Structure formats: C-alpha cells, structure tokens
Image: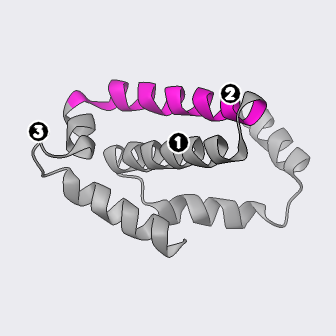
Amino acid sequence: MSRVLHDLYLKIKERKQASPSTSYSAMLFERGTDHICQKVGEEAVETVISALRGTKRELVEESADLIYHLLVLWADAEVEPDSVWDELRKRENQSGLQEKLQRDDNN
C-alpha cells in the first residue's frame, strides 16, 4: 500500500476516538455507516462528473475525496486495506473478464 494511503488510514482510525466537533472523520463515524456510505456515493458521482466535464485538476481533487471517504468506510467496517490489496494481488494474473465471470457464477 502506498505510504500516503497507509498513513491516512491510520490517522482516520485514530480519529474514531476524537471529538466530532474538532474532527471531520470523527463526525462521519458519529453519524454512522449509512451516512458514510452516502458520502462515498456522493464522492463517486462527483468523481465521475469531473472526469466527464471537469478539468484534470478537478478529477484529482474529487478522486482524493473519494479515496478518503472509502478509507473512512473501511475503517468503519474494520476492513484493513491490506485485505483489499491482497484481493487485488489475487486478481492480477487473471483477466478482468474471467474474474467477473467467476463472481457472476457465485451470485
């Protein structure tokens, strides 16, 4: 995992214990999983819109917001980023189409 992502994830986890009046992350945790999921969705839509209509700079900014909120969601769900990286590593020698077919077969 990138050092930046690792450090940010650790900081987000620390903020679970902070006061919501002084920490945006703590405020998100206090509002709960539904609110965090809503924020991830909003940021995903804003990222897509900036890719379609915005500048490269806007895409970078919205992507950063999306990644931050995704890390908050992982921390809320107690998902360690290494679990996600491991899943990506498992898929790296497999075509995306093959992997998708296997997931569709499991549903």
- Check disc 3 and report the residue beneath it: 21
The three-letter code of the residue at mark 2 reads: Ile
Mark 3 to mark 2 CA distance (whole Å): 31 Å
The quarter of the picture where the N terminus appears is bottom right
- Check disc 1 and report the residue beneath it: 66
**Residue 85 location, x and y as percent?**
59, 64
Q: Identify whether 61 is placed above or below 14.
A: above
Name the residue at 76% across, 60% down.
Answer: 91
**Residue 62 location, x and y as percent?**
56, 41
Q: Nearer the viewer, residue 45 or 80?
A: 45
Q: What are the residue bounds of the magenta stretch?
A: 31-52
- Whether tag 1 and tag 3 are in contact, CB under 8 A, the answer is no
User: Which comes before the other along the chain, label 2 or label 1?
Assistant: 2
Name the residue at 67% across, 33% down.
Answer: 50
Magenta residue check for 15: no
The three-letter code of the residue at mark 3 reads: Ser
Q: Main secondary structure of the magenta part?
A: helix
**Residue 100 location, x and y as percent?**
81, 41
Name the residue at 43% across, 69% down.
Answer: 6
Mark 2 to mark 1 CA distance (whole Å): 13 Å
Mark 1 to mark 3 CA distance (whole Å): 22 Å
Question: How many neighbours does mark 1 have within 10 angstroms: few (below 14), some (14-19), or many (20 or more)?
Answer: many
Q: Is residue 90 left or right of residue 73?
A: right
- Check disc 2 and report the residue beneath it: 49
